[in-house]
């Protein structure tokens, strides 16, 4: 759905046409579910959260002023809702996870190029799942949804420099997880 179609649907919803909201849901449901799943890790929780996000978006679409893209506004609602769900479950969330600094041996990753795309996807999924919820969302928004640092800042409320740090630390941690999984895979074959 292009920008003009999104604007048209939003105006129709604001005008009372509730069916037009279905088009917005269809265009953004995968993105919302993916963010929910990355943050909540449970498919059932993610499905429930995604439904709640769309209910919240529908109820507050009248306040949408198009200062940012609709998808950014919806990301923000999704992110905030998932943080609320996590806080209810955990009571407290550590948004900055310290990762021990260490030199990364780039020679270890040569094996990643020689495996199938399906296996690569499996290793990347495991690596993303090893991240803290917020870090996993930042990685997903940056690499999979290709949002800019400024757009991610708008969604998460973090500064661009904090996002850069999270991306750097997340890449290092993901690299370590992938190396560990590749090593264990290779040693189980031998």
Image (cartoon, rainbow, N blue to C red):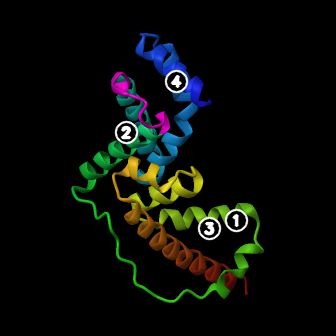
Q: Mark 1 — residue?
A: 119
Q: Give the spatial CA distance, label 1 vs label 4.
A: 40 Å
Q: In what element is the residue under mark 1? A: helix
Q: Mark 2 — residue?
A: 77
Q: In what element is the residue under mark 4? A: helix
Q: Mark 4 — residue?
A: 7
Which image quadrant for residue 179? bottom right
Mark sitting earlier along the chain (3/2)? 2
At label 1, counting other C-alpha atoms closer than 10 Å, the crowd grade (few under 14, some 14-19, many 20 or more) is few
Mark sitting earlier along the chain (3/4)? 4
Mark sitting earlier along the chain (1/4)? 4
Q: Mark 3 — residue?
A: 123
Q: Are marks 1 and 3 in contact (CB under 8 Å)?
A: yes
Q: Between residue 158 and residue 99, name the one nearer to us.
A: 158
> Percent x, y for residue 85?
31, 46
At label 4, counting other C-alpha atoms closer than 10 Å, the crowd grade (few under 14, some 14-19, many 20 or more) is some
Q: Nearer the viewer, mark 4 or mark 2?
A: 4
At 39% from the left edge and 47% from the top edge, which residue is drawn?
154
Q: Give the spatial CA distance, label 1 vs label 3.
A: 6 Å
Q: In this rendering, is residue 6 above or below 187? A: above
Q: Which residues are magenta?
A: 60-71
| 105 relative position to 189: left or right | left
Q: In this rendering, is residue 123 above or below 65? A: below
At 37% from the left edge and 33% from the top edge, which residue is drawn?
52
């Amino acid at each position: 759905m292009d920008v003009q179609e999104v604007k048209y649907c939003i105006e129709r919803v604001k005008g009372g046409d509730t069916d037009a909201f279905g088009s917005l849901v269809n265009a953004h449901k995968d993105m919302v579910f993916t963010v929910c799943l990355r943050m909540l890790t449970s498919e059932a929780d993610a499905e429930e959260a995604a439904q709640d996000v769309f209910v919240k978006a529908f109820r507050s679409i009248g306040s949408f002023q198009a200062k940012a893209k609709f998808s950014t506004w919806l990301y923000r609602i999704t992110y905030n809702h998932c943080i609320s769900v996590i806080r209810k479950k955990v009571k407290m969330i550590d948004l900055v996870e310290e990762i021990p600094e260490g030199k990364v041996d780039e020679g270890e990753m040569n094996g990643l190029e020689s495996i199938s795309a399906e296996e690569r996807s499996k290793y990347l999924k495991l690596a993303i799942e090893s991240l803290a919820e917020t870090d996993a969302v930042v990685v997903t928004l940056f690499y999979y949804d290709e949002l800019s640092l400024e757009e991610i800042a708008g969604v998460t409320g973090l500064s661009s420099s904090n996002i850069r740090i999270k991306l750097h630390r997340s890449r290092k941690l993901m690299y370590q997880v992938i190396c560990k999984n590749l090593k264990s895979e290779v040693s189980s074959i031998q």
